[in-house]
Amino acid sequence: MEGAEGNAGQPGPAERSHRSSVSSVGARAADVLVYLADDTVVPLAVENLSSISAHELHRAVREVLQLPDVALEAFALWLVSPLLEVQLKPKHQPYKLGRQWPELLLRFTDASDDDVAMDEPSLQFRRNVFFPRRRELQIHDEEVLRLLYEEAKGNVLTARYPCDLEDCEVLGGLVCRVQLGPYQPGQPAACTLREKLDSFLPAHLCKRGHGLFAAFRGRGAKTGPGEQGLLNAYRQVKEVTGKDSEREATLGSHYRAYLLKCHELPFYGCAFFHGEVDKPAQGFLHRGGRKAVTVAISLEGVHVMDNREKHVLLGLRFQELSWDHTSPEEEEPVLWLEFDGDSEGTPVNKLLRIYSKQAELMSGLIEYCIELSQAAEPTLSQESASGPHEAPSPSPPPTQRPKLRRQGSVVCSRIQHLSTIDYVEDGKGIKRVKPKRTTSFFSRQLSSSQGSYTMVQPTDDSLEQS
């Protein structure tokens, strides 16, 4: 559990089931159940269960599924329960971590004693948080693409990946193509979509009693706007033709199209953590309170998302923030995010407090992602230099991230919905409500020649990477 690769987070609703992956049989041969993203199970008969490593189990899963070598980097083993999820390092021993699960829950969650006693993790084969998107675009193996597609689809349908309606329709259309086959004019597609709507669109879009799917009431109801958009997207799914592919009858191109669309979401491939933030003071009495949030951290940056409203509250690249975590005795652990902003037209620094018992884990993951990004920069430069000698890639440059720029998009920041501490420096001290950042409360920043941040190295007391 030590180090940044032992990432803990908040499982999605689809994963909230009690499933056991290992049995308490000591050193004898035992069946280990490894769950895939589509909830299918890979049973493994292993010897010396108590000492087998995640790396050995990972290799066994790859052999059973006959996956290519790229799967070693693309996927990782996770321990997941309704209360906590942890990406394992290759050296971790899943059985021992499973036995230590109650201790991890007490350390990293606010679960009650009864919930801790009842909780049991399952072993899952999921996307590796540290696998770069640009590498994902180079994958051609259909089974690897299918596993990535199933995981991404699950995150979209459970709203772990907040999406605008337009994007939900496009993604849903691709799911229709995968599950129902090519669109055929005249077939009763509308009835099929209506009956299985939550298989194609996020549940919170399907269950509204007014607006989006109000027209679904009654058999004779006209097609609702959301359903019509889904039908249009299904109709527009492009089929692979010609000799560009020998797999015309397979689904690989549709898996890839789904993943490419998900790559437009800035939080794709993140590890998820749970926490709370302060609400802005409202009313005559300036009452605030807190709201539950999900913190998504990846190689790209940090996103804070509103659990209830299913939209982004704050999105920051590592070049745009400083961070630290505090764990004072008898007080809640806090992850601090510091970023540039303005207060009534005045440039200021903004501090956001995220209350979470996983603050230490989030801080460690941010630091480790930055280290990986910096280590990858020379490699990317060499690849760019050798570009003319290689076949052109259809993917965008690694430094270019597609953005959804619709007004009011769910992936746009809503800083006005956050309560932050604003401050400037006047040369004598820190005043709440600093022109361009030249100093910071925190020394942890991304060292970069771009942006307005000074080049500051991480402090020596950073979270241990082991």
Image: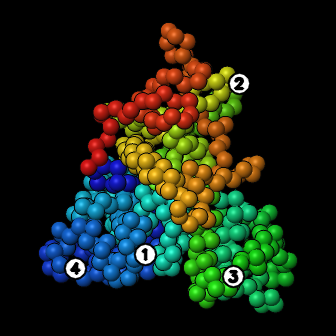
Q: Is mark 1 on a helix, strand or loop?
A: loop
Residue 344 has which mark?
2
Which amino acid is tagged 3?
A: Glu
Which amino acid is tagged 4?
A: Val
**In this figure, which residue is indicated by the disc labeled 3?**
239
Give the mark, 1 or 2, whose residue is nearer the N terminus: 1
- Provide residue 92's location: percent of width, then percent of height: 25, 61
Q: Which colour scheme is used?
A: rainbow
Which amino acid is tagged 2?
A: Glu
Within 10 angstroms of label 4, few (less than 14), some, or many (20 or more) residues? some
Which amino acid is tagged 1?
A: Leu
Vertical placement of residue 182 versus 253, above or below: below
Q: Which quadrant of the figure contains the N terminus?
A: bottom left
Residue shown at 64%/54% (left/top)?
A: 402
Label 4 – label 3 distance at C-alpha: 43 Å
**In this figure, which residue is indicated by the disc labeled 4?**
46
Q: Which of marks 4 and 3 is in front?
A: 3
